[in-house]
C-alpha cells in the first residue's frame, strides 16, 4: 500500500522562477512532475538577461572589478556603442583614438572651457580664469574682447580705413607715427621756434624775409597765434595783428585802431614763432642746378664779386659752382685739378689759385667762399676761403680782353651750362647764401665769413643778387636783393640743416 504524506509538498513559482505545476500539492501517492525554470540559459554558453542585478561588487574575469560605489578598476576595451544617460566620471586618464562628439565639452581645473554643439566655444566663466596657449592660435573669424568686436589685425600703415573693429600691428603704428606724428612731420613742426627781425616797415606792414612753417594735416593751420611780435621790446597784442605769406616775405599787418599806434620805419620789430628752419640746396653732380635771370642777354662781362657758402666732400674735379652758360663763361670750379680752384673767362684768360687747405674745403663741412673776378685784368682776381686769402698759382693771360666770351645766358648756379644733363658740368655738394656784387668786395671777406655764421647781406651796398636758398620747399630760390632775379630749382633738393 503506498505511503502518503499528512502534509503535502507544494511548489509555487516565484520572482524569476516558474514551476510547471505551480501550487499543486504532492502527497506522495502518485507521481507529480514539476519543471522548474528561471527564464534564462545559465549554461556557460548561454545568454543570460536580467532586468536588474544588485550586488556590492562584480568581478569580471581576472582584470575588471565593478563596485557598488560606481568605480571600475582594471582596463576596459569597448568596441561598440555606449550610451550614458547620466554622468560619467573618470578619475584617471581617458585616451581616445577616435573622435569625441558631444553637445558640450566642459573642462574645469583652475579655469574652464566649453565647446558647444554649434561650434562656438566659451573659455572661463569668471574674471579670474586664466588660459595659457603655448602654441599658435588661428582664428579665421571675428573675435570679441570685453564685449568689443574685432574682425581684423590690420597692417595698414596709413590707418586709412578708420575701422572700429580692427587692431593695428606694431609695425603699422610705428610707420604711421614716424610718418605723421613723429620725428618727420608733426614733432619738428611743434618744435619750430625761430627769431626773425623785420627788414622794412611801410604802411603799418612789417616785412620779414622768412617763410612761415606749414602745419601738417590734422594740425591747426599756422596763424598769428603761433608767433610773438615785439615792437622796440614791447609785446604787440594779437587782436591787432594779421600775418600773411607773400612769396619769400612774411608780412605782419597791423590795425592801428586796435593797436593804438602806427608803425614807424625806425621801429625795431622782432618775431618769435613757427618759421621754417634755415636750410640749403643739395646738388647731386648729375643734372641739378638753379637757373636765374641775372645778367645774360650777351652782356659783356664786368668785374664782380661772388660770395657763397659751400659744403663739399668731393676731392676730385668738381664742376662748377656757377657760370653764365654754354662755353663756361665766368665759370668757377672749386677743384679743377690737384685741389686748385679756377675761374675761367675765355681761351687763355683764366686764373688758378693754390689748393685750399683740406680742412677749409673738402672736409664735408660748411665754408665761406668769396671770389673777385677781374675780367679786364685777370691778374687782379682774388679768392678767399673762411676769410683767408688763397694765393694765386697761375695766371693765364695770353689771350686778350677782346677774346672774352659774352654772357649769352643768365647766371646758372650748380653748373657751367644750364639745362644740361652732362654730369661733368655740374657741382656736387651743398650751397646757400649766394650773392653777387659789382666790383671788388673782398675787403668784406672776414665780415661775411662772420666766424662761421652766415652773414645776411640784404642791406649791403651795391647788392645785385642774393639767393639765400633757405626756403626748404618749392621750386623757387628767391632773390632777397629786391632786384627780382629769382632762380628756378631744377633737380636740386632742399635740406634742413
Image (tube, grey):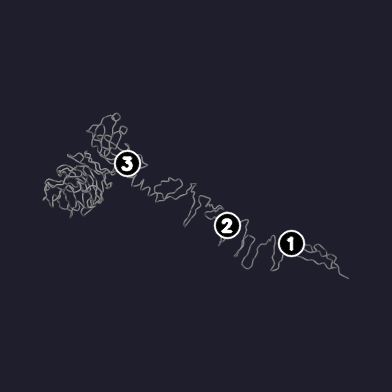
Sequence-wise, the earlier of marks 3 and 2 is 2
Element class at badge 3: loop
Q: List the single residue furthest toward the right.
A: 1
Q: Mark 1 points at which residue?
A: 16
- Residue 454 at what x, y percent from top left? 22, 44
- Residue 414 at what x, y percent from top left? 23, 48
Q: Name the residue under label 2.
A: 101
Position of 82 with respect to 430 (left or right) is right
Residue 77 figure quarter: bottom right
Structural distance between the alpha carbons of marks 1 and 2? 39 Å
Looking at the image, which is closer to me, 4 or 99?
99
Structural distance between the alpha carbons of marks 1 and 3? 104 Å
At x 75%, y 65%, the residue is 37
Which marked residue is nearer to the observer: mark 1 or mark 2?
Answer: 2
Q: List the single residue furthest toward the bottom.
A: 1
At x 24%, y 33%, the residue is 202
Q: Mark 3 points at which residue?
A: 214
For disc 1, the neighbor class at 10 Å (few under 14, some 14 to 19, many from 20) is few
Q: Give the label on residue 205, or none.
A: none
Sequence-wise, the earlier of marks 1 and 3 is 1
Looking at the image, which is closer to me, 345 or 166?
345
Residue 21 figure quarter: bottom right
Q: Do the residues labelled 1 and 3 touch (CB within 8 Å)?
A: no
Q: In this view, does 156 lie above or below 38?
A: above
Amino acid at each position: 500500500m503506498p505511503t502518503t504524506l499528512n502534509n503535502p509538498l507544494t511548489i509555487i513559482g516565484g520572482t524569476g522562477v516558474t514551476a510547471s505545476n505551480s501550487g499543486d500539492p504532492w502527497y506522495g501517492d502518485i507521481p507529480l512532475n514539476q519543471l522548474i525554470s528561471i527564464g534564462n540559459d545559465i549554461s556557460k554558453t548561454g545568454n543570460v538577461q536580467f532586468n536588474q542585478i544588485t550586488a556590492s561588487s562584480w568581478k569580471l574575469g581576472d582584470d575588471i572589478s565593478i563596485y557598488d560605489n560606481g568605480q571600475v578598476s582594471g582596463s576596459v576595451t569597448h568596441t561598440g556603442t555606449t550610451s550614458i544617460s547620466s554622468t560619467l566620471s573618470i578619475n584617471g586618464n581617458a585616451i581616445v583614438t577616435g573622435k569625441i562628439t558631444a553637445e558640450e565639452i566642459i573642462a574645469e581645473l583652475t579655469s574652464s572651457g566649453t565647446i558647444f554643439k554649434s561650434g562656438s566655444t566659451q573659455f572661463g566663466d569668471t574674471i579670474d580664469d586664466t588660459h595659457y596657449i603655448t602654441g599658435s592660435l588661428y582664428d579665421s573669424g571675428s573675435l570679441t574682447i570685453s564685449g568689443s568686436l574685432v574682425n581684423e589685425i590690420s597692417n595698414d600703415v596709413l590707418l586709412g580705413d578708420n575701422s572700429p573693429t580692427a587692431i593695428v600691428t606694431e609695425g603699422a603704428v610705428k610707420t604711421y607715427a614716424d610718418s605723421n606724428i613723429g620725428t618727420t612731420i608733426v614733432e619738428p613742426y611743434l618744435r619750430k621756434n625761430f627769431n626773425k627781425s623785420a627788414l622794412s616797415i611801410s604802411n603799418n606792414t612789417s616785412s620779414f624775409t622768412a617763410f612761415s612753417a606749414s602745419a601738417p594735416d590734422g594740425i591747426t593751420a599756422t596763424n598769428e597765434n603761433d608767433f610773438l611780435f615785439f615792437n622796440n621790446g614791447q609785446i604787440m597784442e594779437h587782436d591787432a595783428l594779421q600775418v600773411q605769406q607773400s612769396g619769400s616775405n612774411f608780412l605782419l599787418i597791423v590795425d592801428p585802431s586796435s593797436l593804438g599806434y602806427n608803425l614807424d620805419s625806425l621801429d625795431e620789430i622782432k618775431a618769435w614763432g613757427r618759421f621754417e628752419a634755415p636750410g640749403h640746396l643739395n646738388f647731386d653732380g648729375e643734372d641739378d642746378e638753379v637757373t636765374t635771370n641775372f645778367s645774360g642777354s650777351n652782356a659783356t662781362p664786368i668785374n664782380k664779386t661772388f660770395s657763397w657758402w659751400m659744403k663739399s666732400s668731393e676731392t676730385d674735379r668738381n664742376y662748377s659752382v656757377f657760370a653764365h652758360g654754354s662755353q663756361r663763361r665766368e665759370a668757377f670750379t672749386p677743384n679743377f685739378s690737384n685741389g686748385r680752384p679756377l675761374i675761367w673767362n675765355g681761351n687763355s684768360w683764366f686764373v688758378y689759385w693754390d689748393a685750399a687747405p683740406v680742412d677749409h674745403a673738402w672736409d664735408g663741412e660748411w665754408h665761406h667762399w668769396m671770389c673777385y673776378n677781374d675780367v679786364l685784368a685777370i691778374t687782379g682776381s682774388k679768392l678767399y676761403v673762411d676769410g683767408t686769402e688763397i694765393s694765386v698759382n697761375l695766371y693765364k693771360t695770353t689771350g686778350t680782353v677782346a677774346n672774352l666770351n659774352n654772357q649769352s645766358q643768365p647766371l646758372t648756379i650748380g653748373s657751367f651750362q644750364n639745362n644740361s644733363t652732362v654730369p661733368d658740368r655740374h657741382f656736387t655738394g651743398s650751397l646757400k647764401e649766394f650773392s653777387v656784387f659789382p666790383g671788388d668786395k673782398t675787403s668784406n671777406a672776414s665780415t661775411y665769413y662772420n666766424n662761421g655764421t652766415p652773414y645776411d647781406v640784404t642791406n649791403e651796398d651795391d647788392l645785385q643778387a642774393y639767393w639765400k636758398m633757405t626756403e626748404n620747399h618749392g621750386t623757387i630760390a628767391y632773390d632777397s636783393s629786391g632786384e627780382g632775379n629769382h632762380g628756378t630749382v631744377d633737380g636740386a633738393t632742399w635740406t634742413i640743416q
